[in-house]
Structure formats: structure tokens, C-alpha cells
Amino acid sequence: MKKLLFLILTFGIASQSEAQSPKLTEGFKRADSNGDGKLSADEVNQFPQLNTKLLGADKDGDSLITFEEFRTQLVAGARPPSTPSSPSSPATKLTAGEHTRTVVVGDLQRRYRVHVPKKYDAANPTPVVIVFHGGGGNPESMVRLSGMNAKSDEAGFIVVYPYGTGKLEDYLLTFNGGGCCGYAMQNKIDDVGFTRALLDDLAKVANVDTNRVFATGLSNGGIMSHYVASELSDRIAAIAPVGGPLMMDAPNAKRSVPVMHFHGTGDEFAPFKGGFGKGAASGKGVTDFKSVEHTIQSWVKANGCKPEPEVVALPDKADDGMKCTRKTWSGGKDGSEVVLIEIENGGHTWPGMEPPMAMLGKSTKDISANDLMWGFFQKHPMKP
């Protein structure tokens, strides 16, 4: 019961289509434990995430929430607050802390969150890491899931969390990563144009080191990382996707893009060997994923790396039933390389972080994805 509501309201991977009304109906029914068609305070209080989002939903004051009140409150709560008459954010210089900015891409008003580290110095060019959320998620869920803000404060880079698109403004969002996913792909949303626009906007309000702009993300966010490396290789120096394959036949990068890809062999949602996997309700997965082998070999070929990797077993630090192997295809053009971090028995999770739900599989503590990818990014700035 709690799994579905958590995924609908926060992580969102349960959304294997954009039919939000059926999902909301199912979520309501699961919360309505006595089946009377109304949610009591006790039923709502079983779900802290739901409790917060339903504050003020009881419009008739009868201490019960009907489905219509439930649906109306979630949709209304998903709408962004009113904005100034200008559709884009003013060019006010950013300081340390949390910010949300708006840009216009075509006919759409798009948003992104920014975490500026405490040690940020506007006098010095600063690296940027773009973190794309998973399919059905949002920046809020990605902040918690990845733990990237802590790494940002430690290392001093700026973190950007783009919002995907969907029928709701803040929930069940996806990115168009070329061959996936959901609403964004079906509606041909220009997320490459959005990424370019947000980088242009960020450069107006922060001192960005344009040679050190990197991308990562989980699941649909990992797919989007591969896609921007392919389509925005003039802006993205290197990428480190997690649990999301390249969903194109081959990348179109204009330059060699170093790639570090993390994937668990036990990932049931974006299977290591490709295919549909399973959905959050144990049904058919969201799409026919391409394999990790396809992903790696496509970049090896594109970057002109050596055909055989160097294979190194990483230290087995945690007693978690998982082992990690680093496979490196080196010798690429302009010093590029392709690295696979293969997590034996790992799930659809962010290495080094606790997964938000057990159903997503195991997450190894042998490694920290954030530490490994930041070390990789430091090795691979874009050459001027």
C-alpha cells in the first residue's frame, strides 16, 4: 500500500504511462483502508508524504476527504506559485543556498533548481553538475535520492536539478531522452533545447566554468544524460549516468565525450541485458530498454577507445552481498575513456545511498557513485 503512494507522490517510477487519473484512483483506493470512499484523518496519517500534500483538502469541513477533494488538492498543489509577468527569471546573481529559476523554451515555461555550495566564490569559475531525476520523479526526490548536495558542499561545484514535464507540474515528470520516456517523449518535448537554455540562463547569474559542465541522473535521468552527451557535446564535458542506458542506436556527439556508466546486474526496472523489465506494480516495465552492452560499445566506438577493457575488482568494503567491478576502455580520442561500474546484484539504485523503496533492489555501500563520478569529472574537463 505505502509503496504505490510513495512512488506516485515522490519517486514516481511507478508511472509506466502518463494516465495519472487511474494512478491517483488506485492510490486513493489503497489509502482508503475501510473502502468507504472517503479518507479519514487516521487513514491519511498512515502516509506522511500524503498527509503534508493533503493539508486543506477537506473543503466541506466534514473531516473526511473524498476522491474529488483528493484529486483536486494534488493537482492544485502541483501547480507552481504565481510568477512575475516575465516568463523567465530575472538575472539576479546567485548566492550560496537553494534557488529555482525559470526559462522559456519554445512555447513552454521550464524550471530548474540550483544548489549553490557554501564555498562558492563568484570571482572564480565554478564547475556544474546537472542531475536529471528519474521517470515520474522530480528535483525534490532526486535531491534526497542522490545526496548530491552534500558532495557539492564538499567539493564546491554547483548542482542543477531540471524539472521534467508531465500532465502535472511537479509530479510524475519525465524527460525526452530520444527513445524514452513517457509524456516527454510522446509529446516530443525539447529537453535538449531546455538543457541548453538552462545553461545559458545559469551563466547569467553564476560564474560557470563552461569547460566543466557535467551530467548525471538515474533511470530516465541516466538516459537523458546519455542524450545530452550525444546532442550537446559542445556544452557537456563528461557524463556519469546511473541505471539508465543509451536509448539511441548510436550517439551523435561532435566530439569525444568521456562516459562513466553505473549499472546493477540485478536491476529489474532497467535490466542490465536490456528489455522491458518490470513495472512498480510488478507489471510490464516502461519501455524496451537497450542493454548496458549496447550502451558501452556505442560510446567505445564513438570515442575511438581500445576494444578491450582493463578490468579491476573494486574493494569489497561492505557486507552487502554485492561486488563492484570497474571496466575501463581507454585510449579514446582527445584522452577520452569509457568506464563501466558494474554492481553485481545491484538494483535500480544510487550506489552509496539508501534506496527510497526496498522494491527498487539493493544499493551497494562498497562504493559512492558521487565520489567516483566527481573524480571522473575532475579528470575530464572539456578541452578548450
Image: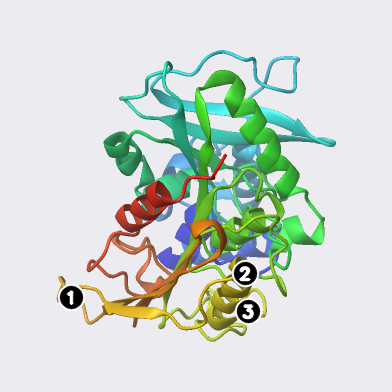
Q: Is residue 9 left or right of residue 96?
A: right
**Mark 2 Cα-neighbour bin, 10 Å: few <14, some 14–19, many ≥20:** many
Measured Cα–Cα span from mark 1 to mark 2: 28 Å
Contact (Cβ within 8 Å) of mark 1 with mark 2: no
- Image: 232 above or below 160: below
Which quarter of the rendered picture does the N terminus lie within?
bottom left
The kind of residue tagged 2 is: Leu
Outermost right residue: 107
- Image: 94 above or below 209: above
Look at mark 2 in the image and give the residue it sits on: 246
Q: Which mark is residue 316?
A: 1
Between disc 1 and disc 2, whose residue precedes?
Answer: 2
The kind of residue tagged 3 is: Lys
Q: Position of residue 234 (x, y in %)?
A: 66, 45
**Mark 3 Cα-neighbour bin, 10 Å: few <14, some 14–19, many ≥20:** many
**Mark 1 Cα-neighbour bin, 10 Å: few <14, some 14–19, many ≥20:** some
The kind of residue tagged 1 is: Asp
Contact (Cβ within 8 Å) of mark 1 with mark 3: no
Q: Is residue 114 left or right of residue 154?
A: right
- Image: 185 above or below 214: below
- The answer to which quarter of the image holds residue 178 is bottom right
Helix, strand or loop at mark 2? loop
Look at mark 3 in the image and give the residue it sits on: 290
- Image: 84 above or below 76: above
Residue 330 visible to the viewer = yes
